[in-house]
Image (cartoon, rainbow, N blue to C red):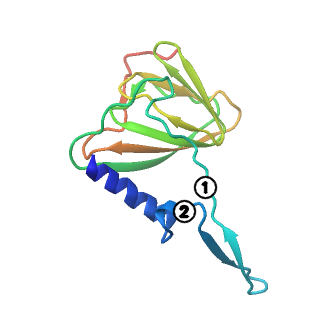
Amino acid sequence: MKKMLTLVCAATLTICGTMALTGCKDAGARQVSPEAGVVSAEQVTSEELIRTSQSWDGVELPDYFEGQPELVAVKYVFPAGQKLGWHHHPVINYGVLMQGELTIIGQDGREKTVREGEAVVEMVNTIHHGENRGSKPVVLYMFYLSQKGLPLAVQHPEIPLE
């Protein structure tokens, strides 16, 4: 747990650059206008998209693994009308939908539609699939809290899509 917290803090520092961790949203950024060579002060802003200990279906997330963590970031693009097969994630993962709408369907029939700009925490060890029911591609950035050698998802081809 201590190693995971250290790694998350290091990632936050990387994202915030050299700004103080607690002042990330209030730290000033300086930008130069290429036309006039004028330096202007603008504020770096931040918006917390989600803070939770539960997946989208309300189930508590599992405890962290013991040992060395591996963080993985993946960009997914789902064409309009595309359906993903049934699968489950053995690791905690969450993401932000950058474009379109993605509907996640649990094996029990429960659904969650994630819209552009929204964050989602995926189910862990629960079989589900996703569908792009919209007319434009879905662009989704997902972040996995894993360990070396673990798959990000396990497919279930034995369960047919309807």
Q: At x 56% / y 20%, what residue is drawn?
A: 111
Camera-side residue: 62 or 129?
62
Q: Dot 2 lies on which element?
A: loop
Residue 129, compared with residue 52, is above or below; it is above
Residue 74: image location, x then y, percent: 46, 47
- Give me the disc on residue 65: none
Q: At x 54% / y 63%, what residue is drawn?
A: 23
Camera-side residue: 109 or 83?
109
User: What is the spatial separation of the Cα atoms under label 1 and label 2, in whole angstroms?
Assistant: 8 Å
Q: Are marks 1 and 2 in contact (CB under 8 Å)?
A: yes
Camera-side residue: 28 or 118?
28
Residue 137: image location, x then y, percent: 64, 39
Q: Residues within 10 Å of mark 2 (few under 14, many from 20)?
A: some
Residue 161, compared with residue 69, is above or below; it is above
Q: Residue furthest bottom?
A: 37
Name the side, left or right, on which 113 lies relative to 16. right
Residue 49: image location, x then y, percent: 58, 44
**Residue of label 2:** 24
Q: Dot 1 lies on which element?
A: loop
Residue 142: image location, x then y, percent: 48, 43
- Give me the disc on residue 46: 1
Q: Residue furthest front?
A: 22
Q: Residues within 10 Å of mark 1 (few under 14, many from 20)?
A: few
Q: At x 60% / y 55%, what residue is drawn?
A: 46
Disc 2 residue type (three-letter)? Cys
